Amino acid sequence: MRTNISSFPHGQGERKEVFPLLMLALAILAAANIVWGSVSIPAATVWHILCGNEVPDHPAWHFIVWENRIPQMVTALLCGAALSTCGLLLQTAFRNPLAGPSILGIDAGANLGVAIVMLCMGGGVSVGGMAVGGFMLVIMAAMAGALGIMALLLVLSRWLHSAVMLLITGVIISHLTSAVISLLNYSATEEGVHSFVMWGMGTFSGVSTDRLPLFSALCATGLGLSLMLVKPLNALLLGDRYAASLGIRIHATRNLLLCCTGLLTATTTAFCGPISFLGLAVPHLARMTMGTSNHRSLMPACMLTGACLTLLCNLLCTLPSDGTLLPINVITPLIGAPVILYVILHRK
Amino acid sequence: MITLSNLSTGYDRKVVARNITAHLPKGQLVSLLGRNGVGKSTLMRTLAGFQPALGGQVAIDGHDIRQLPRTAMSRLVSIVLTERIDVAGMSVTELVALGRCPHTGFWGSLTPADQTAVDQAIRMVGIAPLAHRQVHTLSDGERQKALIAKALAQDTPVILLDEPTAFLDFQSKVELMRILSLLAHDMQKTVLLSTHDVELAIQLSDLLWLLSDDGLETGSPSHLSQNGTIARFFREVDARYDATHRVFLLNEGKGI
């Protein structure tokens, strides 16, 4: 595809050799997520189970590997790719390195949607145990919340070119939504509050095998649509006016971008809870490793890095040796916060 | 190439300039001069199709720009703006390659022909040694040249530049004007730039557009020099215009 007939190598700066390494890391981390878990199962036995065999001594192990670890691995992988892509889309669209789904309050919008459904529908409705009808309602509510905040931000973005203004707006939106959520919590049942709090800590174990196809389809749709934005996103790096002069239809691009981000944030938030920091940090890691802002290689790199990092976080959740799982939101800031600090300190 | 008929520019209901009628011929370097706030940028934005005309029409190559879709416009007009581009992780070559957007396919991949166009544009403005540099490490003058190369790679008959010489040192100003003059004459581009570098514009342009509250006056620098239009246009300046040497000489004996 790329011919070097010219004197200036046009892909200069793009480190394509990173892709095989990322793929390898992804494969290793995915395998590690199946082998390690809160219940200790010997690696050879895991392989035995994966080959379709039963383990007569421990009948539960078969269930753990097939119904628990594999769906969880796939969920974490897709969730990481989805959130990282969201972050990249937002950072380019807002031309702001600190844009991201959680900082901008987009997942706060999704939270609000979920809170309204969970807390107003009474107690005992956790995401895992909900009938499909109710579950779809949660997704729709999260989507409506996320898209609402996205639309608001896009309108405001005309005046919010500085990182500080955007952050302040995100903080305000988050505070407003959490105020409403507090009100809902106040009037909700104890069970409702408990399930909402548990959901809020984030987990990749909430997607059961029968929900996995829906989750995967929604994520794949969002990721696929995002990939179609590669060319307009590259032009948008120069700003709206230059992009328009290059023949990019700005409004259509912004609308598609809004839909992608809303869909991906809402899907991951509804299924896994609000996962913090990943969406903001991963695009920067991807930029550092790829050494380019060209979305044609940056976006796939972002998806792979996000998937790898999320699998790593999920693995770290199983660290307590007493068989409990740490919530995912305990781990993600440990990786995300240093990256963001680095970006702030190294801005020119 | 570009024809302005009874054009009125402005925002919403506020008219900035009205009844502008002018013609921009092919292969000429045209400088738009005028005081701050007189509507130079508004006129440039209207010509680029970023904001609608309040009256009259702009025709490029015989097409009314209101009828032209964004994609068709992008093959006719390329721009260099005053707004600073702020992007990390993009090389000069990648920036210039973005100029090929109107010609590339869905994914924006460059064909060998596209790459040749990018290389030629880079050589034409003399930034081959900078080709691998990151855009955010360039000086103001180097960045303007890179943006001109981007406009050149876009391969449009018309190039509009909004104050391309602002913020540049004198050497870079002269060099930039010479590049633009070369593009107009050797490559038959229609180049319109707005500028405050009056003497450079008078010496290097084929045509001057003088925009004031009274409207737009156009003509060649020699014609406008001889008939006293330039002297009249800059009458508020405490200097007299030497029409022979095309320079302004400060009035003596009026020290501050």
Image: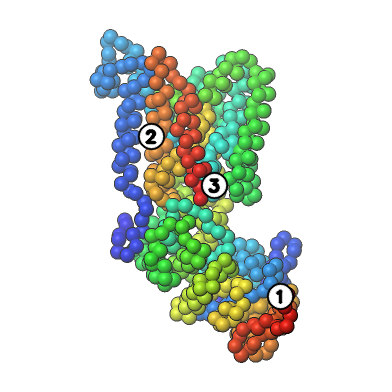
Q: Nearer the viewer, residue B55 or A183?
A: A183
Secondary structure beneath dot 1 equals strand
Disc on res. A96: 3
In the depicted structure, whether residue A8 falls above or below residue B192: above
Neighbourhood count class around disc 1 (C-alpha, 10 Å): few under 14, some 14–19, many 20 upward: some
Q: Chain of mark 1?
A: B
Q: Do the residues indicated by labels 3 and 1 lie within the same chain of the protein?
A: no
Q: Chain of mark 2?
A: A
Residue occupied by mark 1: B212
Q: Residue shown at 38%/47% (left/top)?
A: A290
In the depicted structure, whether residue A136 falls above or below residue B6: above
Q: Are marks 2 and 3 in contact (CB under 8 Å)?
A: no
Query: Most extreme residue toward the top, as rendered?
Result: A57
Neighbourhood count class around disc 3 (C-alpha, 10 Å): few under 14, some 14–19, many 20 upward: some
- In-image side of B62 versus A53 (left or right): right
Q: CA distance from mark 3 to mark 1?
A: 38 Å
Please identify the quarter of the rendering in which residue A140 is found: top right
Query: Which of the two discs, 2 and 3, sits closer to the camera?
Result: 3
Q: Position of residue B228 (x, y in %)?
A: 69, 88
Q: Residue shown at 42%/46% (left/top)?
A: A287
Three-letter residue code for mark 3: Asn
Q: CA distance from mark 1 to mark 2?
A: 61 Å
Q: Looking at the image, tell me whether mark 2 or mark 3 is earlier in sequence order.
A: 3
Disc on res. A308: 2
Please identify the quarter of the rendering in which residue A99 is found: top right
Q: Do the residues indicated by labels 2 and 3 lie within the same chain of the protein?
A: yes
Q: Residue shown at 54%/65% (left/top)?
A: B80
Three-letter residue code for mark 2: Cys
In the depicted structure, whether residue A1 falls above or below residue B223: above
* Residue A218 can be seen in this image: no
Q: Chain of mark 3?
A: A
Q: Are marks 3 and 1 in contact (CB under 8 Å)?
A: no
